[in-house]
Image (tube, rainbow, N blue to C red):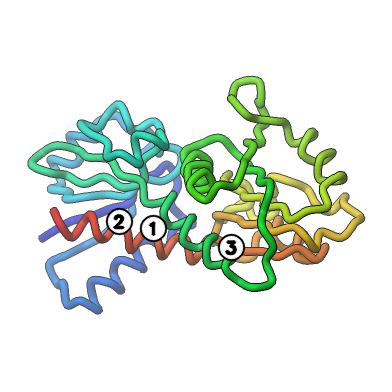
């Protein structure tokens, strides 16, 4: 049996197990399994891998950055990003990868290739965790400038507060991309939002809001953005892309 998993603190929102189980069924891989493993901390991670015979696992909030000291090696993208969402077990060594960045970049490129989309000259990344850094890496690959938005901007480079962002949005009249890379609005806290657009009273027709959350879809943020005329994108396609990229790593172990 080849065992794979997703680890995180809370996983009630996740569709990953369903995606991999459907993959295994399509490919006739009866001796493969994928499970959701909630971990209150990363203590004992290596012992869990060895005890359960885990061949590889995905990583979600809040461990994408915290897991790095536990790993034996990072591939080049994961090292550059400073976050890991995929780990392979190779002869007992834990090797970290990042498939979030490529998945986000692929889905964003498809949006940008649409004929009705003008060039994006500015972007804001809500959050400063592992997913946010993967997004920032992808934006850099595409040549799109970004600024992080944080509740504690003084603790981060290239960051502003949410209050500063709200003021800036009032003055922008070019194509703007805003990405939610926080858990705000994710099931079960579906009424939460990282940015309250209900107080906005001007059209956002030149704005694109991309929310990495896929459960629920749309989130409150995307509903409010769409009501103001913005283009919106949820995180379900990105989930599928990063899972496909993770599988390319998993199938080799």
Dot 2 falls on a residue whose secondary structure is: helix
147 vs 226, left or right, is left
Residue 209 coordinates in the image, percent (x, y): 67, 57
Residue 30 coordinates in the image, percent (x, y): 14, 72
Q: Residues within 10 Å of mark 2 (few under 14, many from 20)?
A: many
Please tell me which residue is depicted at 67% across the width and 64% down the height of the picture: 232
Mark 3 or mark 1, earlier in chain:
3
Q: Residues within 10 Å of mark 3 (few under 14, many from 20)?
A: many
122 vs 247, left or right, is right
107 vs 60, left or right, is right
Q: In this view of the protein, which residue sits in the foreground, 82 or 139? A: 139
Q: Residues within 10 Å of mark 1 (few under 14, many from 20)?
A: many
| Alpha carbon distance from label 3 to label 1 | 14 Å
Q: In this view of the protein, which residue sits in the foreground, 252 or 219? A: 252
Which of the 4 quarters of the picture holds residue 120? bottom right
Which of the 4 quarters of the picture holds residue 191? bottom right
Dot 3 falls on a residue whose secondary structure is: loop
Residue 112 coordinates in the image, percent (x, y): 59, 64
Dot 1 falls on a residue whose secondary structure is: helix
Q: Which residue is mark 1?
A: 242
Q: Residue most toward the top?
A: 154
Above or below, 61 relative to 161: below
Above or below, 164 relative to 4: above
| Alpha carbon distance from label 1 to label 2 | 6 Å
- Quadrant placement of the N terminus: bottom left
| Alpha carbon distance from label 3 to label 2 | 20 Å
Q: In this view of the protein, which residue sits in the foreground, 160 or 115? A: 115
Above or below, 87 relative to 113: above
Q: Which residue is mark 2?
A: 246
Q: Which residue is mark 3?
A: 234
Residue 100 coordinates in the image, percent (x, y): 42, 51
Which of the 4 quarters of the picture holds residue 76? top left
């Amino acid at each position: 049996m080849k065992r794979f998993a997703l680890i995180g603190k809370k996983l009630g929102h996740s569709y990953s197990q369903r995606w991999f189980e459907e993959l295994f069924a399509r490919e006739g891989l009866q001796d493969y399994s994928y499970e959701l493993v909630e971990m209150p901390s990363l203590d004992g991670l290596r012992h869990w891998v060895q005890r359960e015979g885990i061949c590889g696992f995905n990583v979600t909030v809040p461990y994408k950055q915290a897991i790095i000291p536990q790993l034996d090696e990072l591939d080049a993208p994961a090292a550059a990003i400073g976050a890991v969402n995929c780990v392979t077990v190779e002869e007992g060594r834990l090797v970290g990868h990042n498939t979030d960045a490529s998945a986000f970049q692929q889905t964003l490129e498809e949006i940008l290739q649409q004929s009705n989309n003008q060039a994006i000259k500015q972007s804001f990344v809500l959050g400063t965790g592992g997913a946010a850094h993967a997004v920032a890496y992808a934006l850099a690959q595409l040549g799109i400038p970004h600024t992080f938005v944080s509740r504690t901007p003084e603790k981060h480079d290239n960051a502003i507060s949410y209050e500063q962002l709200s003021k800036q949005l009032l003055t922008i009249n070019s194509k703007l991309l805003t990405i939610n890379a926080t858990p705000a609005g994710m099931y079960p806290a579906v009424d939460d939002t990282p940015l309250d657009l209900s107080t906005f009273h001007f059209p956002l027709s030149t704005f694109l809001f991309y929310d990495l959350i896929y459960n629920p879809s749309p989130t409150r943020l995307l509903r409010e953005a769409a009501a103001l005329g913005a283009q919106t994108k949820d995180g379900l396609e990105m989930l599928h892309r990063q899972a496909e990229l993770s599988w390319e790593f998993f199938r080799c172990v």
